[in-house]
Image: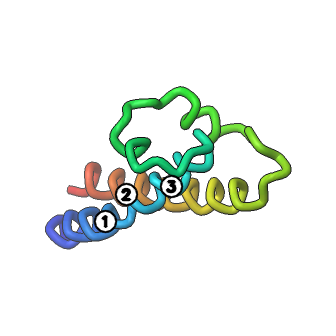
Amino acid sequence: MKTFLFIALIIWGIPSTFFRSKFRKIVYQTDDWKINIKPLFRKEIIGLIYNLYPGNKDYIKTRNSYRIYLLIYLALFLVYYFYK
């Protein structure tokens, strides 16, 4: 079972680059590919918790999808970590 959870974590982690890239491009308002390799975390975390752009429906949809993705990822990790 622990091996299955580990494989599930790896597979679930694959789309993280897509979600994070799309979210960061909206938060930092850029289409530059270099945003994916820059360690700019503060505004990203604030944008994930709060509502930076209340009128931007794409931001809200992307933020909510990213939140759900991260919650499932966290749940998988916690089950994997605490599974005996």
Q: Nearer the viewer, mark 2 or mark 3?
A: 2
Give the labeled residue for mark 3: 71
Where residue 13 appears, as percent x and y from the top left, is 32, 61
Front disc: 1 or 2: 2
Query: In the current view of this chain or complex, which residue is farthest to the top?
Result: 42
Which mark is drawn over residue 17? 2
Residue occupying image coordinates x 24% and y 64%:
10
User: What x and y, as percent, mark residue 4?
Assistant: 20, 72
**Which secondary structure lies at badge 3?**
helix
Q: Marks 1/3: CA distance?
A: 15 Å
Q: CA distance from mark 2 to mark 3?
A: 16 Å
Please give the name of the residue rendered at 33% of the width and 53% of the height, measured from the top-left corner: 77
Q: Mark 1 or 3, which is nearer the eye?
A: 1
Where does residue 26 sit, x and y in percent of width and height? 61, 49
What residue is shown at x 27% (from left), y 70% (from top)?
11
Is mark 1 in CB contact (under 8 Å) with mark 2? yes
Residue picked out by circle 1 = 14
Q: Callout 2, which amino acid?
A: Thr
| Label 1 CA crowd tier, 10 Å (few <14, some 14–19, many 20+) | few
How much space separates mark 1 and mark 2, taking CA atoms?
Answer: 7 Å
Relative depth, front residue between 45 and 5 = 45
Q: Dividing the image into 4 quarters, which one contains the C terminus? A: bottom left
Give the percent coordinates (x, y) of residue 79: 34, 57
Q: Earlier in the sequence, mark 2 or mark 3?
A: 2
Q: Which mark is residue 60?
A: none
